[in-house]
Image (spheres, grey):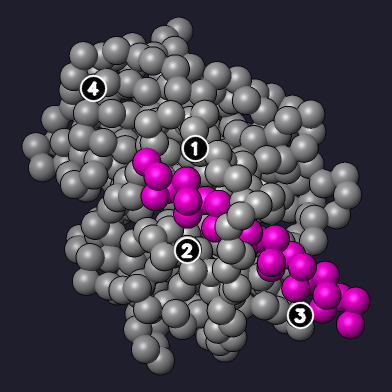
Amino acid sequence: MKKNLIITASVLMISLIIFGVIFVYNQGKSSTNNLIPTTQNQSNPTPTQQSQRVNNITSSPIFDYWMSSDSMMYTINQSGQIQKQTPGAQEVVSTQIISALNRLYSAPDGNKIIARFNYPQHPIFSIFLIGENTWEPLPQNTLAAAWSLDSKKIIYLESKNSGGMIKILDLATRKTQDVVGFNQRDVALDWIKELELLITINTPSIDFPSSIWSLNLKTKALKPIIREESGLSFIWSKENGVGLKLTSLKQKPILSLIDENFDTLTNLSFVTLPEKCVIAQKQIFCAVPQNIPDGTRLPDDYYKKAVYFQDNIYRFDLTSGGITTLLENNSTPIDAMQLSIKDGKELFFINRYDSKLYSLPL
C-alpha cells in the first residue's frame, strides 16, 4: 500500500509540473523571466490511466532500429546485420558484419542510415542505402556526421593533419563542399535547419562540461548557444520548436523544458534522460524511472550501464495539458530507450534489460 501511495504521489507531482509546462508553452517565448508560472491557484490535472499490453516485436536482441518513408521497420543487430520487420516475419536485408558498432544515424526519410563503428580504436562512418543494400564509407578520419532535413546531403567533420574541416556531401552528385575549418575532435553534429548546424563539444559527462555552438552554413558565423554545462544532453523537435535538456548542477541532475533558442522555459521536478523521451505532434512521451538510487551519477552511469531503471511511460499533451499514463509497470522490468512514434498509433522502444524491440499501442 505504501508503494502504491508513493507511485500515486509521484504521478500527481508530475501532473502539477507538466500543467505548468503547458502554461509556459502556450504563453509564448518572449521573455524567459515571465515564463515561469505560479501553480498555487491553478487546478491540478488528473492523469488518465491507459494501461496497455506491451508487444514484443523482435525475438532476438538488436542494436538499433528505424522506420523508412513507407512505414517499414528495420533493425540492426550488434553484428551489423540488417533485417526488415514485417508482420509475423523477418527479411534479411544485409548480412555484412560490422565490428564494434557504436552509433546509428537514420536519415529523416528513413531510407538510408549512417553507422559509426570500429569504435573507439579508429572510428569509421559508413552510409547504407536501403534500396541498393550497399555500404559506402565516408572519408577516412571522419569524426562526426549528420543528415540534412531532406535526407539528400550529409554534413561531416573531417580531421586532416593538425586541423579539421566541416564539409557537405551531396549524395546525388557525389560532390563535396568545404564549409568552414573547425579544429575539435570530440563533437556531435545536428543539422536542425536548412542553414543552421548545431555543434556539441564534448561527450555528455557529469565530470566534464559540454558546450553547444550554432554554425550558420551561409555566413559561416559561429555563435555560442550553451557554454560549459556538466552532464549536458538534449533532444529538440524540429517541428515543434521545443525540447528537453538535462544538465548537472553540483552533481544533481536537472531536466528542463527548452525553446527553439535553447532558453530554459521551466525546470521539471522529475528526472529522466532526454534520450528516454520523444517529441511528436505537440506531445512529449517519456519513460520516467520510478526510482533513481542515491549516488547515481547521470548521465554517466546510464551510458556506462552501471545503473538500470524500472520505468513508467507517460504522454504529456502540450496543447490540452492532458497527461496519460501509458505504462505503469511493477512486474516485468522495462528500461525504455530510443523511443519513437509510428503513424501516431504506436510507441516503440528498446528495453535495455534484453535489448529487444517492443511496442505500446497509443
* Sequence order check, earlier mark of 2 and 3: 2
- Circle 2 residue: 321
**Which quadrant of the view contains residue 50?**
bottom right
Residue in view at x 57 percent, y 68 percent:
45
Asked whether the viewer can see residue 50, the reply is yes
Query: Relative to the observer, which residue lies in front, 337 or 268?
Result: 268
For residue 120, what is the image quadrant?
top right
What amino acid is labelled 2 in the image? Gly
Amino acid residing under circle 1: Leu
**Label 3 vs label 4: CA separation?**
49 Å
Say above or below: 26 vs 71.
above
Does the residue at mark 2 contact the one at mark 4 (Cβ under 8 Å)? no
Q: Decide if residue 327 is on the left or right side of residue 127.
A: right
> Which residue is drawn at the image coordinates 87% and 44% (left, top)?
295
The three-letter code of the residue at mark 4 reads Leu
Q: Which mark is residue 4?
A: none
User: Residue beneath label 1, please?
Assistant: 35
Tag 3 residue? 330
Which element is circle 2 on? loop
Q: Chief secondary structure of the magenta span?
A: helix
> Distance between the Cα atoms at labels 3 and 1?
36 Å
On the image, the x and y values in percent for residue 306 come to 79, 51
Q: How busy is the neighbourhood of tag 3: few (under 14 within 10 Å), some, or many (20 plus)?
A: few
- How many C-alpha atoms fall within 10 Å of the one at disc 2: few (<14), some, or many (≥20)? many
The answer to which of marks 3 and 1 sits earlier in the sequence is 1
